Image: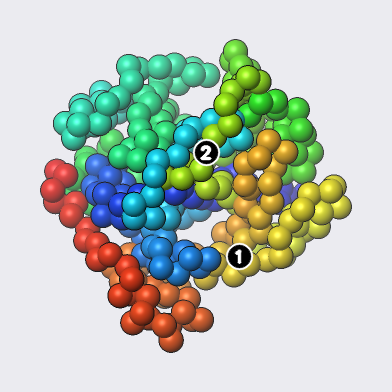
Amino acid sequence: MKPLISGIHHITAIAGNPQANIDFYSGILGLRLVKKTINFDAPDVYHFYFGDELGQPGTVFTTFPFTGARKGVKGTGELTYTAFSIPKGSLDYWIERLKKFGVPVSDKLTRFGHELIRFEDHDSMGIELIANDQDDRAGWTYGQIPLEHSIKGFYGATLNLRSKELTAQLLTNHMDYHFIGQEGDRYRYGTEGKPGDIVDIVVNPNGHRGMQSAGTVHHIAFRTANKSTQLEVQRILMDNGYQVTEVKDRNYFNSIYFREPGGVLFEVATDEPGFAIDEDEAHLGELIKLPEWAEPSRKEIEKNLIPVTLKTEDYA
């Protein structure tokens, strides 16, 4: 039977200044701003989606930029590092680029046979770039980054937990993941074990609890094909004692949410329908798009949103 879950759909973080957020992810990292909308649960806050050319599942890092939000604290019960996939041989380019824009970056590290670098964005969000030759996805660039060095999408994510057993059981028994390997206190899981589906659990039994605010991840979403497969995932989770929400319409996908045993908020999101349902593919992210229920309040909503611009030419 075909797996119900096929990897990571998107990762959503809390951010601070919205313009700085766009400048970092589209300007410095070169991700395409595929959608500007609102936080459906807080309509006075933007929701930005950054990804590849079309915002395909497995490439999209999304943010809720709360102006003036204090910085959060990385800790247990959180997704602490989001890893993006880059072509093998591109680390030196990225080290130089990050330093050019004043971003402190680690030395080259090695994990499960692949080299990587680690750094933080302007809000102290943990980011890794992992160089590999196992990713056949096309990268995206606005032109300020050579295509041969561009980010291809997610590689994976690191969950920082006090223990792994119950979370590992959830992943392997109910979410189509399997155990791949261990390095020290890091345990790796994947659906196929390729870029875009990797989840690492770092066990930190005495770690301090994380505090969610700007610079921390709000949730991680996993991919499922459609509404039918999503309902089957929901049934399986509920039958096994997980407290799962009703299906929520997020315009560009449908979502269900639940807490995994270590405290991280998990989402299961549909691949359908995608980001081109309300904008032409060539013009994704150019306008503020609102869900139908919010359109009558557009003037008031836009009045409360700080204007932002895409300035990728400043980051050549």
According to the picture, the residue beneath numbered tag 1 turns out to be 254
Amino acid identity at mark 2: Met
Residue at label 2?
211
Crowd rating for badge 2 (residues with CA inside 10 Å; few <14, some 14–19, many 20+): some
- At numbered mark 1, what does the secondary structure look like: helix, strand or loop? strand
Residue 277, image x, y percentages: 45, 73
Residue drawn 63% across the image and 29% down it:
161
Of the numbered discs 2 and 1, the one sitting upstream in the chain is 2
Q: Secondary structure at mark 2?
A: loop
Give me the residue at 48% from left, 76% from top.
291
Rendered residue at 32%/74% (across/down): 302
Q: Is residue 217 above or below residue 83?
A: below
Left or right of residue 126, residue 221 in this image: right
- Image: 132 above or below 260: above
Q: Give the residue drawn at x 39%, y 63%.
A: 46
Give above or below for 46 relative to 186.
below
Say left or right for 224 vs 251.
right
Residue 316 x %, y %: 14, 43
Residue in front for this viewpoint, 165 or 303: 303
The coloring applied to the image is: rainbow
- Residue furthest out toward the right: 239
Res. 269 in view: yes
